[in-house]
Amino acid sequence: LVLEESFEFIGIDDSYTIEDYLGMVIQANGLAEGSIMKDEATGLSYVTFESTVEGESYSYLMFATKTDTSFWLFQIGCLTADYTENQATLLEWANSVVMK
């Protein structure tokens, strides 16, 4: 999932940080288990959460980037059974996102 939300659309100004935005997303989506974590190597702020879809349990890594006018929200997921094994790869992918 990739979603762009302009500051104007969500009713905020550009002083909001990525962590502020992720907190708003956690609250808006009822992700009680979603606490903001930080990749110590890169400083990337992210949230992990689980969801069941058609009887299958999935784990997601959600992160955001910020441009001059918007936040961009990204979610990368895999089967929960495979998440621990793939977490480093998912973080690598998240850290490879560049906004221009």
Image: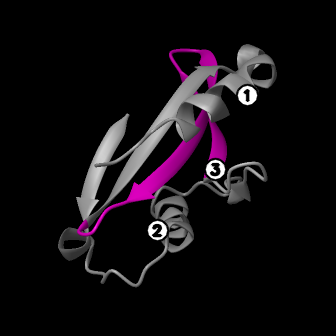
Nearest the eye: 12 or 51: 12
Q: Tell me how far mark 3 sits from mark 2, CA to CA.
A: 12 Å
Residue designated by label 1: 87
Amino acid type of disc 3? Val
Amino acid type of disc 1? Gln
Amino acid type of disc 2? Tyr
Question: Could you tell me which secondary element the residue under label 3 belongs to?
Answer: strand
The residue shown at (60%, 19%) is 78
Q: Quadrant of residue 28?
A: bottom left
Asked if the residue under mark 2 is in contact with the one under mark 3, i.e. CB atoms within 8 Å, the reply is no
Residue designated by label 2: 21
Nearest the eye: 90 or 77: 90
Residue designated by label 3: 47
Please tell me the numbered disc located at residue 3. Answer: none
Residue 6 left/right relative to 18: left
What crowding class fits label 1: few (fewer than 14 Cα within 10 Å), some (14-19), or many (20 or more)? some
- Residue 76 visible within the image: yes
Q: Which residues are magenta?
A: 46-69
Q: Earlier in the sequence, mark 3 or mark 1?
A: 3
Q: Tell me how far mark 2 sits from mark 1, CA to CA.
A: 22 Å
Q: Earlier in the sequence, mark 3 or mark 2?
A: 2
Q: Quadrant of residue 88?
A: top right
What secondary structure is the magenta-colored segment mainly?
strand
The residue shown at (76%, 48%) is 41
Nearest the eye: 43 or 20: 43
Up-down relation of residue 8 to residue 86 (above or below): below
Picture coordinates of residue 91, whole percent (x, y): 65, 35
The residue shown at (31%, 81%) is 12
Find out whether residue 11 is within the magenta segment: no
Q: Quadrant of the N terminus?
A: top left
Picture coordinates of residue 49, whole percent (x, y): 65, 41
